[in-house]
Image (cartoon, rainbow, N blue to C red):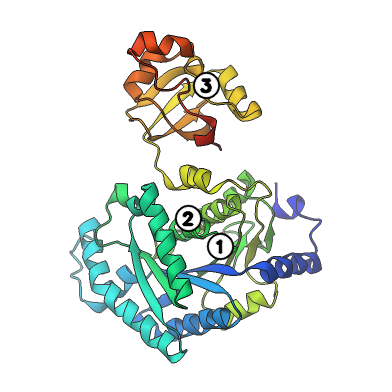
Amino acid sequence: MLMENLYSEISASEAISLRKQNLANAKRVVVKVGSAVLTDDNGINNDAIQNIAQELSFLKKNFKEVILVSSGAVAAGKRKITIPDSTTIGLVEKQALAAIGQPSLMQSYELAFEECGQNVAQILLTHSDLADRKRYLRVRNTILALFRFNVIPILNENDTVAVDELRFGDNDTLAALLTNLIDADMFICLTDVVSLYTGNPQTIKDARPVHTVKAVTQEIEAMAGNVTSALGTGGMQSKIRAAKIVATGGGSSFIAPGREDRILQKIFNGELIGTFFLPSPDKNKPRKQWIANVLHPKGSMVLDTGACAALSKNGCSLLPSGVVEVRGKFGIGDAVHCIDNKGKIIATGLVNYSSEDVDIIKQHHSHDIAVLLGSNDSDEIIHRDNLVLL
């Protein structure tokens, strides 16, 4: 189903009106800039850096609290040294390139923002910084303190130390998680494409730009295709996922061309540029956002039809009687997927029992737990307060 059929009722004037309404209410904004926007054949593109600094300073002068999530460290490092053609660029090499490029990237930002009369701060994160609930809240408190000091935080994934299990995957995801973390009203992803299209514009001649998305459906995700940048790790699919994460936190999102002059001013003037994603009417509580979007599930449990219905329709907790199979190894407090008998993930939650204990008590009533395990720490495998429907 094509996008215009899904949203044919939205005219250009209505789309602009929706934008202006959300933009007028936005007080806290997260801006993410990709590697392809920030670098050129000579390394860091100082004109692009200067433009970003001017645009974020414009937002600050208009009483917005702003965070910048910036890619570019690996690309900057790659352009700073000569790498033999025979060298294989793996994880260790990328970490080394990030270490080389990060100082020059931040120096470029500091000089550009200084010209705008604006102070900046650097924060480097790995996934474990947000996966731990206490550290997650400390990151939030640090950012809010920087706002009080009238400083713009510049964040990036700590590529120098991050390994697969500690990675966000891409800065689109990191920026979306930070948007929800600080209760920002808006996420703006500045990239090297103009907008979301009805198809891949590189291969489909009549692909058309999509200016407004009410909800990220399967049709919208299918439009993203698999377009990636030569310098970045995230393609359009990661940007759609990021917009979906932000929507569940009650925020709106933009995907817009980062190389366009005065791009943020054009967006906040309500111009029909890029793709605008509306917030979801069903906002998750902060703790459930953290469970659903930040944590990496350690395993899964297959549920019977009754348990699936109890979770999805009645908002119930997950009891042992509803579990028919345990997959993977997990401990108490880990995030675990709940799946139906067709393999579809229906929920994620924090478990009260290890995988070994769940395997023992599955398909039993709660009053049997003490007999089977020798104690009963909880009647539920996952309490509904720690369960997020997907």
The answer to whether residue 123 shows anywhere in this view is yes
State which tag comes first along the sequence, 3 or 2: 2
Q: Are marks 1 and 2 in contact (CB under 8 Å)?
A: no
How far apart in space, not on screen, are marks 3 and 2 (Cα)? Answer: 30 Å
- Image height check: is 149 above or below 8? below
State which tag comes first along the sequence, 3 or 1: 1
**Looking at numbered disc 2 in the image, what kind of residue is underneath it?**
Leu
Q: Are marks 3 and 1 in contact (CB under 8 Å)?
A: no
User: What is the crowding at mark 2: few (fewer than 14 residues within 10 Å), some, or many (at least 20)?
Assistant: many
Residue 319 picture location, percent across and down: 50, 20
Q: Which of the 4 image quadrants contains residue 203?
A: bottom right
Q: Residue at x 77, y 68 (%)?
A: 17
How far apart in space, not on screen, are marks 3 and 1 (Cα)? Answer: 38 Å
Label 3, secondary structure: give it.
Answer: loop
Front: mark 1 or 2: 1
Q: Residue furthest bottom?
A: 115
- Image height check: is 191 above or below 301? below
Residue 159 picture location, percent across and down: 29, 61
Viewer-nearest residue: 298 or 238: 298
User: What is the crowding at mark 1: few (fewer than 14 residues within 10 Å), some, or many (at least 20)?
Assistant: many
Name the residue beneath numbered marker 2.
177
Name the residue beneath numbered marker 3.
341
Label 2, secondary structure: give it.
Answer: helix
How far apart in space, not on screen, are marks 1 and 2 (Cα)? Answer: 10 Å
Name the residue beneath numbered marker 1.
184
- Image height check: is 346 above or below 30? above
Q: Is residue 189 left or right of residue 359?
A: right
Residue 175 picture location, percent across and down: 47, 61
Front: mark 3 or 2: 2
Q: What is the tally of numbered marks visible in this picture?
A: 3
**Looking at numbered disc 1 in the image, what kind of residue is underneath it?**
Ala
